[in-house]
Amino acid sequence: MRTTTHRPTGSALVRLFAYYLSGRIAETQWKQLSRLLDARSTTPEEREALATFFSDLLQERKAELRIPRMKEFRELLATARMAV
């Protein structure tokens, strides 16, 4: 049997929303993730990168998502911004 790895096309934000609608992301996780994505300090590029990370994680591992708290997220962003 032949198998292939298929990465869905389109926005990672759309894929994340589809995962939420299908029940792969719980309501509490979706609210936490939405807070991070909607934060004023998050740039559009950072939103897409965050959505891609979590979307890929769900696709590859089918793992339970562990969403960072806002303080942890700010620290991660600060570290990433310093590296750029």
Image (cartoon, rainbow, N blue to C red):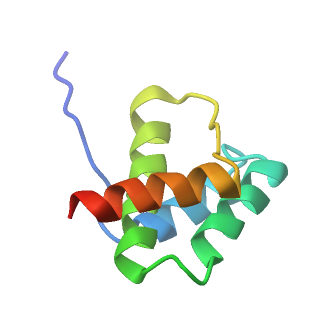
Which is nearer the eye, 52 or 75?
Answer: 75
Residue 71 in the figure: left or right of residue 81: right
Quadrant assignment for the C terminus: bottom left
**Numbered marks: total:** 0
> Residue at 63% across / 77% down in the picture?
39
Q: Position of residue 62 (x, y in %)?
A: 52, 30
Q: Position of residue 81 (x, y in %)?
A: 33, 65
Which is nearer the eye, 36 or 13?
Answer: 36
Q: Position of residue 55 (x, y in %)?
A: 46, 50
Residue 11 in the figure: left or right of residue 65: left
> Residue at 82% across / 53% down in the picture?
27
Residue lying at the far top of the rendered structure: 1
34 relative to 59, above or below: below
65 relative to 38, above or below: above
43 relative to 64, above or below: below
Residue lying at the far front of the rendered structure: 82
Q: Position of residue 21 (x, y in %)?
A: 70, 59
Which is nearer the eye, 52 or 37?
Answer: 37
> Residue at 64% across / 46% down in the picture?
68
